[in-house]
Image (cartoon, rainbow, N blue to C red):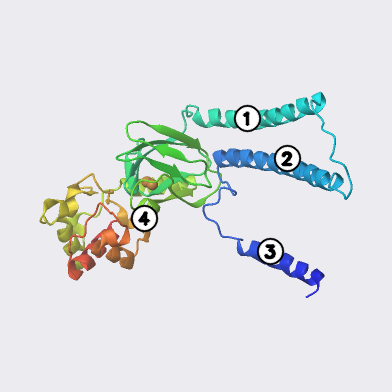
């Protein structure tokens, strides 16, 4: 193959490789959708272009010097140069100036993301658990898990703490990571600018199912957010009003006391008006969520059945044990849980 063709083939394969990386990337920090994300992205771009400029200048000088001063046959060794004041001052000053250009906006951004939230910010308490996220809305009293709903265009402040080990909250398109630590409250504030569902995950190794500790942030217009809040505040379907026979049977399976007691659903889960467990996610409106199990399974009859049948099989290390439900109990529980809209 002629050299020209080889070069063309190489270029073509590099271009093809690039297009293969074309997405979609639901968790890309490079397409921010909140002010915090834009600020961090701006820092990244500034540093990227500065580093690119340094790279090009240094490589160009290296190549120039390597060619211009290469050894030639019969040439004597070059004379040594020592103590060129102008050169030494300039290669000390240039990096210092570049570091200042990087440091000033970086520190400004850090201070900006640590400032106290404004009075009109919507506060959401985020509690990291092995391996799921709990969200509480102090203003309205809503309690939910894994899927956070927030209104577009309004400042939101997440007040974050952990129930066990250290986690890290990270929804890349909205902004930076923040450690979630037991015994202290870390905050992160941002204003989302687009409606949509933005994915995220725990970004600090926190045990066996760290990789299954996903999260979803649903940014919606204020009417949809108000409607969601109202729905979450409604009392759940009361046992007496459960029409389907199977859902009623599911409620009984949910209430059943099992051996050992920690195998009972009610020991860990709250369903308002039914049970008051606090170790697992609040299930009062679990049917309204799109996912379960740390956003790792779709909230479909199939996904729920798989989860109820063998939680540690789906999410290794799961605190919810395999309690040996019968297929009939699983079908009934699926019908009941899905009715809790
Ligand atoms: Cu929670 Cu990693």
Q: Which type of secondary structure does the marked residue at label 3 adopt?
A: helix
Q: In this view, does 97 lie to the left or right of 263?
A: right
Which is more toward the observer, 167 or 37?
A: 167
Q: How crowded is mark 1: few (under 14 residues within 10 Å), some or many (20 or more)?
A: few
Figure check: 1 above or below 296: below
Q: How far apart are marks 4 and 3 (CA)?
A: 42 Å
Q: Is residue 299 left or right of residue 155?
A: left
Residue 259 image label: none
Identify residue for label 2: 54
CB within 8 Å, label 1 to label 3: no
Pinpoint residue 322: horizontal percent, then vertical percent.
Answer: 21, 60
Pinpoint residue 279: horizontal percent, then vertical percent.
Answer: 24, 45
| Lower position in the chain sequence, tag 1 or tag 3 | 3
| Lower position in the chain sequence, tag 4 or tag 1 | 1
Residue 103 image label: 1
| Lower position in the chain sequence, tag 2 or tag 4 | 2
Q: Which type of secondary structure does the marked residue at label 1 adopt?
A: helix
Mark 4 lies within 8 Å of ligand 1 (Cβ measured) = no
At a point 60% along the width and 48% down the height, the residue shown is 30
Identify residue for label 3: 14
Q: How far apart are marks 2 and 3 (CA)?
A: 24 Å
Please identify the quadrant where the N terminus is shown.
bottom right
| Lower position in the chain sequence, tag 2 or tag 3 | 3
Which is more toward the observer, 138 or 214?
A: 214
Please identify the quadrant where the C terminus is shown.
bottom left
| Lower position in the chain sequence, tag 2 or tag 1 | 2
The answer to whether one can see residue 341 in this image is no
Q: Which type of secondary structure does the marked residue at label 2 adopt?
A: helix
Identify residue for label 4: 289
């Amino acid at each position: 193959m002629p050299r020209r063709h080889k070069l063309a083939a190489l270029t073509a394969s590099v271009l093809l490789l690039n297009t293969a990386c074309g997405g979609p990337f639901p968790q890309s920090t490079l397409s921010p959708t909140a002010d915090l994300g834009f600020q961090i992205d701006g820092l990244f771009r500034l540093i990227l272009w500065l580093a690119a400029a340094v790279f090009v200048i240094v490589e160009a000088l290296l190549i120039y010097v390597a060619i211009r001063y290469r050894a030639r046959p019969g040439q004597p060794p070059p004379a040594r140069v020592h103590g060129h004041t102008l050169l030494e001052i300039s290669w000390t000053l240039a990096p210092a100036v570049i570091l200042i250009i990087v440091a000033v906006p970086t520190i400004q951004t850090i201070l900006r993301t640590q400032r106290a939230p404004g009075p009109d910010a919507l506060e959401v308490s985020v509690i990291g658990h092995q391996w799921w996220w709990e969200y509480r809305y102090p203003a309205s009293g809503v309690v939910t898990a894994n899927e956070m709903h927030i209104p577009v265009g309004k400042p939101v402040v997440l007040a974050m703490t952990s129930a066990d080990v250290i986690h890290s909250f990270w929804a890349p398109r909205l902004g930076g990571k923040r450690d979630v630590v037991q015994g202290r409250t870390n905050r992160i504030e941002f204003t989302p600018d687009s409606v949509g569902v933005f994915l995220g995950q725990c970004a600090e190794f926190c045990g066996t199912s760290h990789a299954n500790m996903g999260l979803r942030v649903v940014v919606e217009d204020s009417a949809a957010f108000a409607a969601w809040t109202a729905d979450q505040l409604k009392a759940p379907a009361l046992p007496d009003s459960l029409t389907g026979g199977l859902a009623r049977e599911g409620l009984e399976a949910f209430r059943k006391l099992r051996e050992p007691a920690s195998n009972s659903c009610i020991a860990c889960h709250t369903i308002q008006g039914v049970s008051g467990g606090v170790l697992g996610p609040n299930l009062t409106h679990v049917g309204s969520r799109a996912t379960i199990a740390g956003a790792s399974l779709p909230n479909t009859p199939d996904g729920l059945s798989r989860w109820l049948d063998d939680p540690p099989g789906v999410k290794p290390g799961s605190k919810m044990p395999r309690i040996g439900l019968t297929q009939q109990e699983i079908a009934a529980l699926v019908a009941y849980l899905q009715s809790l809209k």
